[in-house]
Image (cartoon, grey):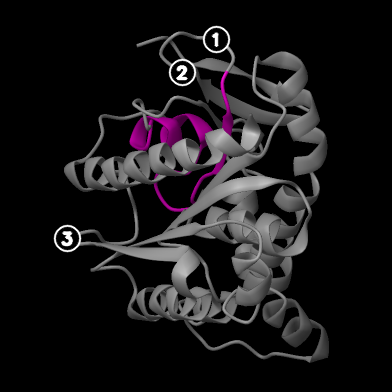
Amino acid sequence: MLSPITGTAAGVPFTALPPADGGAAPLIVTWHMLDAPRSDAAFAAALPMSDVPAWRVHLGMPMCGARMVDGSMDAGLALMRADVLMSYLHPFVRQAAEEFPAALTSIRAQLPVADGPIGVLGGSLGGAVALRILADTEIPVFAGAVVNAAVRMRSVVDLFPGGYAYDAESEKAVDGLDFVAKACAIAGRAPLLVVSGARDHPGLHADASDLVDALGERSELLSIPGLAHPLAEEPGIEPAPQLPVAREVDAGLTRWFRRQLAAAAPLAQ
């Protein structure tokens, strides 16, 4: 297996895993979790999808991995304590989505990736980024996948203690990150695999099922027995050996993207 390639794309750190021959191939872009694995390098180790004949480029989320302030998560935690939705969850998704078009152009300038539609994958909060690329942009996508994703941001906010006092601005923000409500837009863009851990937070697990129901025949639900929310052991910043449950997720993603690449190949000719 070829070694990972690290770099930055329009200021966004990435860990790129080449296809087996290291040559030109389609592109799959991922966004990691804020739980473990919480960096691009750690996410690449947890879900390498080594048997997918594509470049897998794992992007770093804001204030994570190489973008941590002073090498720690303290600054991000301070934002979370200040306002979990408007200072933390919403701006992280917004920034990651808004910086992606320039990052994609830079990736294509640096790596021998095809010019055609891309694949997108996100875990947890990174799943909201992947879903936003599908729902709110016109970037061509051949297939998407999410793992234990933030399908409805309101359900994620509910995980934090103390209750949340919504106002007009925060109601608008949280409703804008309800991807069950945006299912028609997503279904019109690309097929989607929704991976959900059977031991994930009940609200997130229910949202995954609701999204698949709303998407209809262009989606599939893959439930992983024994999988809670994280995909790696703490602290989840550096690459670590792949856990057995992550290996199951990786196998499901590999089957999905290989099938979707094969289906998309005749369209690219």
Magenta residues, start to end? 25-48
Q: Which residue is mark 2?
A: 19
Q: Secondary structure at mark 2?
A: loop
Q: Which mark is residue 157?
A: none
Residue assigned mark 1: 23
Q: CA distance from mark 2 to mark 3?
A: 30 Å
Q: CA distance from mark 2 to mark 1?
A: 7 Å
Q: Where does the image place residue 68, in percent across and percent down from the top left?
A: 62, 38
State whether residue 73 appears in this view.
no
Residue pictured at 71% horizontal, 49% vertical: 96
Spatial CA span between label 3 and label 1: 37 Å
Q: Is residue 102 magenta?
A: no
Q: Is residue 30 above or below residue 135?
A: above
Which secondary structure lies at badge 1? loop
Residue on which disc 3 sits:
226
Q: Position of residue 83 (x, y in %)?
A: 68, 73
Q: Quadrant of the N terminus?
A: top left
Which corner quadrant holds the C terminus? top right
User: Which one is nearer the viewer's eye here, 154 or 135?
Assistant: 135
Residue 71 seen in the figure: yes
Point out the frontmost of discs 2 and 3: 2
Q: Amino acid at mark 3?
A: Gly
